[in-house]
């Protein structure tokens, strides 16, 4: 059967989609961007090629992200994007693959059904859902099988998921809409307010990756930022310091730390004692911003570390959970209802 079909684990992120193929590892890592012709509805490019077109397309072409805040905002585009990604991941499969998809802890049942239906229409035989913090913990090689508490903070593109994990399950979880895209938007607003220059999302992301920080950075590095002068409409460039980026990112970084403190507040004293001993583990692309671990450590007074290959942890966790597939519940997992019952 393995020769005919290959099971897939999918990290369906706001910024990137990662696909893990059973027995092969991560086989696809593409930006979740689609370029479509508005007149005909035809998809022109998907992934990296579509992202390069953002902000540079003619009037009849739009480059868009069909996922917002970790959930589907444009169902048809998501389904067509996944169809192409599945074909790339398993090009010669005879049978349709079974798929495990990661979803944010804050997802509603309606949004869960949208993810399942999109994956089914994209070519999946069966679809199973897994919470992102649980997948991230598995991908970070944490031992969550025992009654010992672990705190995982997954800072993705659209959402930050915070969860206390124990005995292969989520004890307490929370989600904040402060993550990678919120950092980019904060840098765009800062450049507009202080320098009177409009910069694009691509430039903002470059600033975040190059000199981004949420804690004082040694040497205060700088980089040249290019954009459009708000007053004259002409091209303009200026030098931005890391300390300025830290100031710009202060608010979204505080939202993340506040969410972590709230989850700790909701946890039992025994679990908090375990977390103080085991430390807080950061995963997701946003956790790689300089000083994120130092800031959280300062606010919580608990040890904090960034997982190895933090950006791929959720995909690796989905891959590890493929071996549990026959014990998982197919279809919706009703995270919203579970939260209500817990509260």
Image (tube, helix red, strand yellow):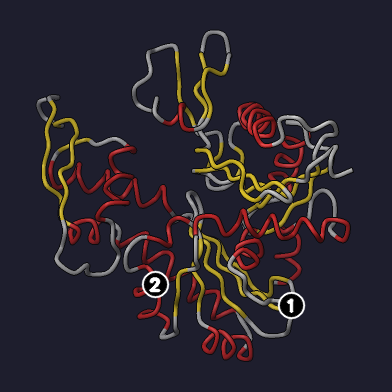
Where 135 sits versus 266, above or below?
above
User: Looking at the rendering, which quadrant does residue 135 occupy?
Assistant: bottom right
Q: Which numbered disc flags the more N-terminal residue, 2 or 1?
A: 1
Q: Residue 86 placed where, x, y %?
A: 69, 34
Q: Image point 73% across, 45% down: which residue? A: 8
The residue identified by callout 1 is 145
Q: Image point 54% across, 81% down: which residue? A: 265
| Residue 318, visible in the rendered structure | yes
Left or right, 221 with respect to 106, comes to: left
Q: Which mark is residue 293?
A: 2
- 334, 22: nearer the viewer: 22
Q: Could you say whether the residue bearing mark 1 is in a helix, strand or loop?
A: loop
**Residue at the extreme top of the image, as rendered:** 39
Tell me the quarter of the image containing the C terminus: bottom right
Tell me the crowding category of disc 2: few under 14, some 14 to 19, or many 20 or more residues within 10 angstroms, Cα based: many
Q: How many numbered discs, if any?
A: 2
Q: Residue 248 placed where, x, y %?
A: 25, 56
**Does the residue at mark 2 contact the one at mark 1 (Cβ under 8 Å)?**
no
Tell me the quarter of the image containing the N terminus: top right
Q: Residue 147 placed where, x, y %?
A: 72, 85
Q: Image point 74% across, 52% down: which residue? A: 129
Q: CA distance from mark 2 to mark 1?
A: 25 Å
- 292, 254: nearer the viewer: 292
Q: Could you say whether the residue bearing mark 2 is in a helix, strand or loop?
A: helix
Left or right, 60 with respect to 236, comes to: right
User: Looking at the rendering, which quadrant does residue 120 occupy?
Assistant: top right
Where 300 sits versus 139, above or below?
below
Tell me the crowding category of disc 1: few under 14, some 14 to 19, or many 20 or more residues within 10 angstroms, Cα based: few
Where 209 sits versus 229, above or below?
below
């Amino acid at each position: 059967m393995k020769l005919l079909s290959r099971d897939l684990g999918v990290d369906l992120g706001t910024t990137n989609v990662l696909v893990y193929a059973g027995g092969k590892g991560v086989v696809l890592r593409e930006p979740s961007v689609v370029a479509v012709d508005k007149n005909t509805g035809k998809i022109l490019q998907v992934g990296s090629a579509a992202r390069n077109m953002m902000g540079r397309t003619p009037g009849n072409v739009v480059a868009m992200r069909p996922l917002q805040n970790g959930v589907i905002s444009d169902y048809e585009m998501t389904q067509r994007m996944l169809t192409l990604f599945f074909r790339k991941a398993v090009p010669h499969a005879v049978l349709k693959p079974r798929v495990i998809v990661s979803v944010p802890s804050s997802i509603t049942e309606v949004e869960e059904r949208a993810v399942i239906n999109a994956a089914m229409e994209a070519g999946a035989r069966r679809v199973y859902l897994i919470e992102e913090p649980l997948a991230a913990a598995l991908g970070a090689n944490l031992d969550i099988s025992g009654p010992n508490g672990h705190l995982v903070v997954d800072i993705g593109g659209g959402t930050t998921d915070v969860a206390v994990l124990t005995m292969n399950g989520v004890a307490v979880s929370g989600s904040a809409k402060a993550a990678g895209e919120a950092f980019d938007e904060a840098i765009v607003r800062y450049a507009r307010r202080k320098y009177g220059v409009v910069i694009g999302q691509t430039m903002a992301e470059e600033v975040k990756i190059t000199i981004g920080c949420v804690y004082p950075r040694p040497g205060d590095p700088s980089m040249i930022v290019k954009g459009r002068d708000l007053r004259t409409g002409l091209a303009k460039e200026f030098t931005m310091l890391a300390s300025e980026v830290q100031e710009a990112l202060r608010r979204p970084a505080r939202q993340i730390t506040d969410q972590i403190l709230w989850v700790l507040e909701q946890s039992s004293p025994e679990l908090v004692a375990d977390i103080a001993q085991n430390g807080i583990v950061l995963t997701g692309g946003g956790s790689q911003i300089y000083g994120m671990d130092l800031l959280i450590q300062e606010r919580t007074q608990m040890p904090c570390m960034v997982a190895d290959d933090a950006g791929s942890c959720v995909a690796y966790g989905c891959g590890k959970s493929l071996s549990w597939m026959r014990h998982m519940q197919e279809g919706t997992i009703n995270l919203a209802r579970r939260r209500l019952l817990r509260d």
